[in-house]
Image (cartoon, grey):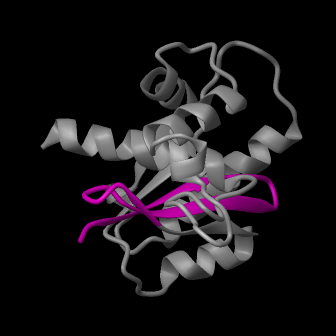
Amino acid sequence: MTVLLAIDPGTTQSGWVEYDAERMAVLDSGVMDNEEMVRSLESPSRVNDVAIEMIASYGMAVGREVFETCVWIGRFVQAYHDPDAVRLVYRRDVKLHMCGTPRAKDANIRQALIDLFGGKEKAVGRKANPGPLYGVKSHAWPALGVAVTAAQQIKEAA
C-alpha cells in the first residue's frame, strides 16, 4: 500500500490527508498546528510520499500571511526524512486537474472531490453509514485535492 500525505499549509495550522491512491481511500485526515505537523513529518509513519500545496506568484501584491505560509512549507519539506522527494503541488494544478479550469473556487474543488468519490450520499454518507470522505472537513478538503492531484502526477510520471 502506497500512502501519500498531502498538506494544505497555513500560517498556524495546516490541513492534511493520508491518502491511499491505489484504493482511492482517505485513511485519515484533519487539521493540526504547524509545530505538530513538523514533528509528525520527523517521526516514522506509514507515509511513502509527501505532497504539499505550494504558493505561486501571479504578479499581485501579497501580505505577511503568504510569506509565513512559505516559511512553513520550507519547514515541512525539511522535516521529512527525504526532503528532495517532497512533491510541491500548485493550487492552479489542483484546479485544472479537479475542475478543468484555473478559475475554480474551493467549493468547486470540494464538489468535484465528492463527485469523484460517488456523490454526496455515497462519498460522505452519514454517521450511521459513513462514506470514504466521512470526517473530511475544513482545511483537509484542499489537502485532499492536493492528494488526488499529486497521485495523478505520480502515476503519469511512472
Q: Nearer the viewer, residue 49 or 61?
A: 49
| Residue 82 visible in this rendered orientation of the protein | yes
Residue 39 in the image: x percent, y percent?
60, 82
Q: Nearer the viewer, residue 119 or 43?
A: 119
Give the magenta part as a residue range: 1-26
Eyeballing the image, is 55 above or below 151? above
Is residue 46 one of those drawn in magenta? Answer: no
Eyeballing the image, is 88 above or below 85? above
Q: Could you say which quadrant of the image residue 37 lies in?
A: bottom right
Magenta: predominant secondary structure element? strand
Instruction: Name which residue lies at 64% across and 72% down.
Output: 128
State which quarter of the image contains the N terminus.
Answer: bottom left
Side (left or right) of 156 relative to 90 = left
Is residue 19 one of those drawn in magenta? Answer: yes
- Which residue extends farthest left? 158
Instruction: Name which residue lies at 50% across and 35% down.
Output: 115
